[in-house]
Amino acid sequence: MITELLTEERIAVVDDVSDWQSAIALAVAPLIADGTVRESYLQAIIESTFSNGPYYVLAPGIAMPHARPETGVNQNGLAFLLVKNGVNFPDQADPVKLHFLLAARDPHQHIALITQLSELFCSETDLDALFNANDVAEVLKVISRY
């Protein structure tokens, strides 16, 4: 399921971003471009972060930004952004490098996807490969195993 949703066009690798809002905007951009989500979804994630903090930072260096389906999700989707030098989020000590941007039409549809992502998150070897990837091809090589 990850490989079905996370295509080459939905993966970006950059050295730096100016701030966490820019990271989220860059991560969600391919999903907006292909109609998976509307621009309102980006705004909902940013507003929710200001209101609730970065609830989607799962572990040091790893985030799964998302918002409620009714805020602009047209279909299920996943995008990935690697910020090689990391970006700081509010109230987080560790910079986030891996951004898995999730869009789900309803809260139940994404359970299988999150299960597969959790398998990835449990693999120290694959996480290290993602943290140290130099380009989209290296990211796809890891993702193809899931």
Image (cartoon, grey):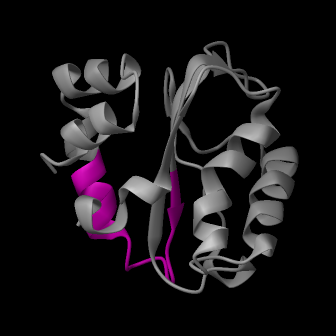
Looking at the picture, how far across and down is residue 134, in whole percent?
40, 21
Looking at the picture, how far across and down is residue 43, in whole percent?
83, 62
Q: Is residue 5 left or right of residue 144?
A: right
Q: Is residue 121 left or right of residue 30?
A: left
Q: Is residue 59 above or below residue 80?
A: above
- View extreme (left): residue: 145
Which residue corresponds to the image point at 51% horizontal and 23% vertical from the top-left?
61
Which residue corresponds to the image point at 58% horizontal and 45% vertical from the top-left?
56
What is the count of numbered marks? 0
Which residue corresponds to the image point at 39% horizontal and 38% vertical from the top-left?
136
Q: Quadrant of residue 109?
A: bottom left
Looking at the picture, how far across and down is residue 49, in whole percent?
79, 47
Q: Is residue 112 above or below residue 37?
A: above
Q: Is residue 3 left or right of residue 33?
A: left
Q: Is residue 123 left or right of residue 29?
A: left
**126 and 9: which is toward the camera:** 9
Which residue corresponds to the image point at 66% horizontal and 65% vertical from the top-left?
67
Residue span colored magenta:
101-117
Q: Is residue 60 magenta?
A: no
**77 and 109: which is toward the camera:** 77
Q: Quadrant of residue 114?
A: bottom left
Looking at the picture, how far across and down is residue 112, in whole percent?
25, 67
**21 and 114: which is toward the camera:** 21
Q: Is residue 29 above or below residue 96?
A: below
Placement of the N terminus among the 4 image quadrants: bottom left
